[in-house]
Amino acid sequence: MRNISPSIIAGDFSKLDREIKEIEDLGITRLHLDIMDGNFVPNLTFGPLLVEGIRKLTKMHLECHLMINNPKKYLNDYISAGGDTVIVHIENNPEFEENLSEIKRQGVKGGIAFNPDTPIKNILPFVNKMDYVLIMSVFPGFCGQTFIESTIDSMSEFVNQKKKNSSLVVAVDGGVNIQTIQQVYDTGVDVSIVGSGLLGAKDRKKRYQELMNA
Ligand code: DX5
Ligand code: ZN
């Protein structure tokens, strides 16, 4: 499916309200929020306070991608802040299954993210418990990295898993741009996260059309 969810960290935070309005005006209905704690990943972004602010600015579906240690401690904060889908990583997180149950118990969509070097067999057994799977096509931490081609197989595999869980949303995150998006679409994924490949463009409207029509 051609459904693009922009990663807001690739936008300009000095005019967040206008950035969000511009994204909405493109006809986009989802927004990807990259939450980094400077520990789980080497970069530090923002926390629930900003998610709450963004929530007030838009009705778009907010995906909170938590790249943080001990996500359990903060799940409630992101849910209360207005996240519609809350995604935890499987790496360094023995409690990911509990996290998923807790997110769902609170009436929010629960997702699992996994890194390019995490074996897919670690995630497959939970396919019926997840609402959303985030296949990382870069190692998380920064925008503008190079798409890792070998992750394409995981995309196809999870699209195939929709036979078991038809409501599963399969998403891909990292290095998706005008050069790489066609192969992503070809796998049949539901959502493509695009950061610098869209928000870094001079003419975003034109770039969005190019990405949708690739
Ligand atoms: C990677 C983040 C991604 C990333 C997307 O750590 O989870 O969402 O910022 O940005 P691009 O599309 O520029 O790789
Ligand atoms: Zn992300």
Image (tube, rainbow, N blue to C red):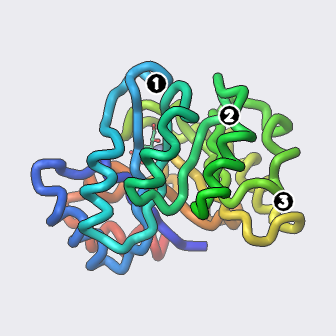
Q: Position of residue 152 (x, y in %)?
A: 69, 48
Q: Residues within 10 Å of mark 1 (few under 14, many from 20)?
A: some
Q: Residues within 10 Å of mark 2 (few under 14, many from 20)?
A: some
- Residue at the spot of label 2: 90
- Residue at the spot of label 3: 161
How far apart are the two marked residues, 2 and 1, measured between alpha carbons? 13 Å
Query: Which amino acid type corresponds to the residue marked 3 in the rendered image?
Result: Gln
Residue drawn where x is 69% and y is 60% of the image: 131
Q: Position of residue 163 (x, y in %)?
A: 87, 68
Q: Position of residue 179 (x, y in %)?
A: 47, 54
- Residue at the spot of label 1: 41
Depth check, front residue: 49 or 147: 49
Q: Is residue 155 above or below residue 20?
A: above
Which mark sits nearer the N-terminus, 3 or 2?
Answer: 2
Secondary structure state at the residue bearing disc 2: loop
Residue situated furthest left in the rendering: 14
**Disc 1, ligand 1: is the CB inside 8 Å?**
yes
Query: Which amino acid type corresponds to the residue marked 2 in the rendered image?
Result: Ile
Image quarter of the N terminus = bottom right
